[in-house]
Image (tube, grey):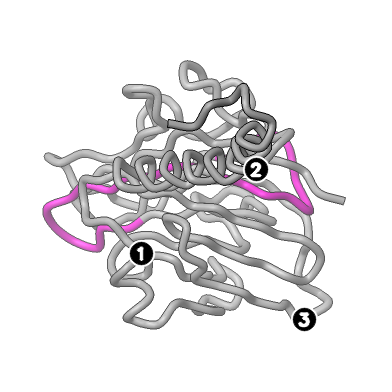
């Protein structure tokens, strides 16, 4: 045992404190990671969803979207979802860091969803156009261009994806950073995309939206959405 009354021992104790705090911090991080999705909410982030109402959101909240257990929810395990459908923010965003948790469940079809950003609604249509942080059906962690170039812009390799993604029925964490022409995605703390846009005509501002993909008997859930706007 170290006697703190001894000046020499007191100095030793003071030198050990930072190391002890560091070890405790890392232990907390490791325990959190083991318990569930890695959630590293940025400082000064604000909630996009209050967990109870559709305030700040717009979309088909009568027949498609609902709130269950604090999550924006769409789909069914009994009936097939006919079309893609999107619940979107009323506000638009340009440079930001967005974090959220998502979960997919399903039995048949293309079990998939996505998080849209820098996106626009297509007038008089159920579709939207813009960047999508894809999820489900093997496209987890990928950056897709929804209803515009209609292709995968960047994606993780198979090894990275296998280590990062959690299976159907479990919560996953997405961190999406868009600043200038650079877009970065992290899935459960693992970086899966670092993409630089080279087309100057692509919109750098737009809504954020969550998706239920059509053609599947599936449920998509999104919760704990926060955003930190960047310069």
* Image depth: mark 3 or mark 1 in front: 1
The location of residue 5, given as percent across then percent down, is 62, 22
108 drawn magenta: yes
Our reading of the magenta stretch's main secondary structure is strand
Q: Is residue 226 visible?
A: yes
The location of residue 125, given as percent across then percent down, is 54, 51
The location of residue 170, given as percent across then percent down, is 25, 46
Residue 22 as seen in the image, left or right of residue 93: left
In this picture, which residue range is highlighted in magenta? Answer: 88-112
**Label 2: which residue?**
15
* Image depth: mark 1 or mark 2 in front: 2
Q: Earlier in the sequence, mark 1 or mark 2?
A: 2
Q: Earlier in the sequence, mark 3 or mark 2?
A: 2
| Distance in Å between CA atoms under marks 1 and 2 | 37 Å
Q: What crowding class fits label 2: few (fewer than 14 Cα within 10 Å), some (14-19), or many (20 or more)? A: few
State the SS at label 2: helix
Q: Residue at x 41, y 43 (%)?
A: 27
Q: What crowding class fits label 3: few (fewer than 14 Cα within 10 Å), some (14-19), or many (20 or more)? A: few
Residue 121 vs residue 9, the one in the foreground:
9
Q: Residue at x 58, y 48 (%)?
A: 124
Choose top left, top right, bottom left or bottom right for residue 22: top right
Rendered position, 33 above or below 164: above
**Label 3: which residue?**
199
Q: Where does the N terminus fall, quadrant-wise?
A: top left
Q: Is residue 86 visible?
A: no
State the SS at label 3: loop
The location of residue 53, given as percent across then percent down, is 50, 17
- Are circles 1 and 2 on residues that touch, CB within 8 Å? no
| Distance in Å between CA atoms under marks 3 and 2 | 53 Å
**Label 1: which residue?**
164
Q: Earlier in the sequence, mark 3 or mark 1?
A: 1
């Amino acid at each position: 045992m170290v006697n703190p009354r001894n000046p020499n021992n007191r100095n030793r104790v003071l030198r050990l404190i930072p190391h002890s705090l560091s070890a405790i911090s890392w232990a907390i991080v490791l325990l959190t990671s083991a318990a569930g999705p890695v959630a590293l909410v940025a400082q000064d982030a604000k909630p996009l969803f209050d967990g109870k109402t559709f305030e700040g959101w717009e979309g088909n909240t009568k027949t498609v979207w609902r709130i269950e257990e604090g999550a924006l929810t769409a789909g069914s395990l009994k009936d097939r979802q006919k079309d893609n459908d999107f619940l979107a923010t009323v506000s638009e965003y340009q440079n930001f860091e967005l974090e959220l948790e998502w979960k997919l469940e399903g039995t048949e079809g293309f079990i998939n969803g996505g998080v849209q950003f820098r996106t626009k609604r297509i007038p008089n249509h159920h579709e939207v156009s813009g960047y999508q942080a894809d999820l489900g059906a093997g496209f987890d962690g990928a950056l897709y261009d929804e209803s515009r170039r209609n292709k995968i812009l960047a994606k993780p390799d198979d090894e990275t994806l296998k280590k990062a993604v959690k299976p159907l029925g479990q919560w996953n964490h997405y961190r999406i950073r868009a600043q200038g022409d650079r877009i970065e995605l992290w899935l459960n703390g693992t970086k899966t995309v670092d993409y630089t846009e080279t087309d100057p005509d692509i919109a750098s501002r737009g809504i954020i939206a969550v998706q239920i993909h059509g053609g599947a008997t599936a449920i998509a859930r999104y919760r704990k959405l926060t955003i930190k706007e960047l310069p």
